[in-house]
Amino acid sequence: MTTYIRASRLGRRDVLRLGLGAGVLSLTAARSRAQTTAKPDVVRIGYLTAARAWVVGKTDGSFDKALGVKVEWVPFPSGGPALSLLAAKQIDFAIFGNTPIVAGLSRKLPIQILGSPEIVATSERLVAKPGITTLRDLEGKRIAVAPSSTMAFALEALIRINKLDASKIKRLPLSQPDTIAAWKRGDIDATYINGPFWAELLADGGRQLLVSEQLQPSGVFVWNSAVVRSEFAERFPETAVAWLQTVQAQFDRYRSDPDGVSRILAKDFGAPFEAVRDTLAGLRYPTFQDQLSAKYWGDGPVAATDAPLIKALGDAAAFLAETGEIKRGDVPASFVPAVNYALLRRAFPS
Amino acid sequence: MNASRRFLIGLAAVAGITLAWEIAGRTHLVEPLLLPPPSEIVTTAIDLARDGYRGTPLWQHLALSLARALGAFAAATLVGVPLGLAMGAAPGFGAVLDPFVQFLRPLPKLALIPLVILWFGIGETSKVLLIFISAALSIIVGTAAAVSTVQRQRIRAGRALGAHGLALFRYVILPHILPELFVTLRLSFGIGWTTLIAAEMIASDAGIGWMVVNAGSYLRTDVVMLGIVILGGTGYALDLALLGLQRWAAPWSGRA
């Protein structure tokens, strides 16, 4: 009872004590709020040194504005170096091919997949010398393909699907510029190659046998995924959400004005406008909302097990293990946990 | 300090570093993805020795790289030493070739790859040629420099004693330049060996240099480290072999 009476007659000291307590409470509350909305000092975005529609946001500071922090852009020539950059914690986000991503995940690289904003359709093509008119004609021929690329994966898939004799086809690992030189010298008979390189070969009398999109009915998908370092996504989820939304905004911008975006990128990359326009047109850009459907990733971890792209990740891993690039024992049992559905849903509520 | 003591100290240093490296990996002080511990590299070595890498046995990768490097080095010696001798002995001839040699020698050989492919294709010729170029140029420069250090008095003395042409070369010039020539060859082999990676970036699907680059693009750091150990160990062994050859052929090295 005494306490009750004392509480009813608050002294100056009690008020002070109360005030102090409230102060501490509100401080801790502020700190915990700060933890969920914490912002990094700088966000480092990795991008492929090729024309990519979303990179238009690099030229006008869209990402700096949307994220509210300093943004650094780190270029990489292909997926392999991108893995090294992520492992060394030199970049936080990147968009690159599914094959290297699978290799990274099986090496337990702490990254998470955030959808697949770019699906390869006609940007990668199989081009052959005149005289080679069917896929069967490729037997006994030399085909150049960029090593550890999505094209190398597509070529193997193509050989398997069409039941060609793999032992009769000589695959030559060549970078794409070197492929052009080898083609001109007559050292190769065909190549699976990306835009804008095929334009030069087609102009040189080359014959297009296939585009990657034609492999999709057989379940072979080639795409570029957005990825984030797991540690970054856990510490700064809000920044990751804002980044995803900004990426989507760049693709929206491209959809409404493909020529305008191509022109800006052509200037930024120092490439001819037509080449950039045709390369960009060779990819399909499903929105993130679309990606979270049964057509791509499924709408959540539960429904995802037989989503086409989850299955395709498993196929890519099996292919890499078979060729000996990764250890079979390293391949994760399921790729579902590698996709951060929660973050995607937060950025793009259904 | 005698030789066996030096060897023991070196061995202890290697063992100490290997142990510290293993502990750092085991305790996750260093992420194994970034620097796989020695035990993982040994496991990978056993795996690759048994199953090969990308369908080629490990020893074949090494044999192929050795064949490319040693073939190129032999050709570079056969071309470089006479050319260097001629440049050193005949200043006029040396003055003609010197600008070209000095221009090409410091050039990063990676820069030559597109041209080499255009001119010589994507076969073995291009790969061997790239190693040949980098080794031959240093051999030429080193040999020419060695010849120019032969003192005039010695040549005059040799002439006065009746030596001319081949005899003068055999008994005066060669004994003088041989120790320096071996140093040049050892350095040039090292330079040629480092070009292996660049050479094996041309349309390869085998070779230790190719293995390192390919494994790197799949984040197979264990294979990368194994390749580095093999490249370094082989380079070291070949240098020791050259050193042995020098002791046999020019035992007066460092004493004359």
Image (tube, coloured by chain):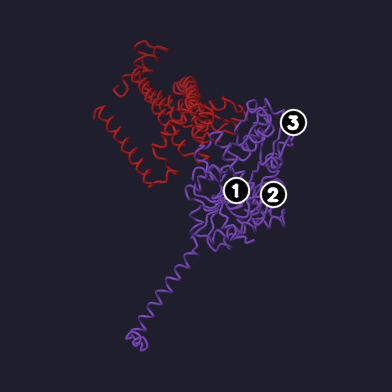
Chain colours: A purple, B red
Name which residue lies at 42% across and 34% down: B43
Question: Who is closer to the viewer here, A10 or A139?
Answer: A10
Mark linked to residue A305 = 1
One can see residue B14 in this view = yes
Nearest to viewer (mark 1 / mark 2): 1
Q: Which residue is mark 3?
A: A134
Residue placed under numbered mark 2 in the picture: A284
Q: Does residue B92 appear in the picture of this structure?
A: no
Amino acid type, label 1: Thr
Tell which circle, 3 or 2, labels the residue nearer the N-terminal end: 3
Mark 3 surroundings within 10 Å by alpha-carbon count, few (fewer than 14), some (14 through 19), many (20 or more): few
Measure the alpha-carbon separation of dots 1 and 2. Answer: 23 Å
Measured from the top left, where is residue B102 in percent x and y?
Answer: 49, 32
**Compared with residue B156, is residue A32 higher up or lower down, i.e. above or below?**
below
Q: Is A112 situated left or right of B29 in this image?
A: right
- Same subunit, tags 1 and 2: yes
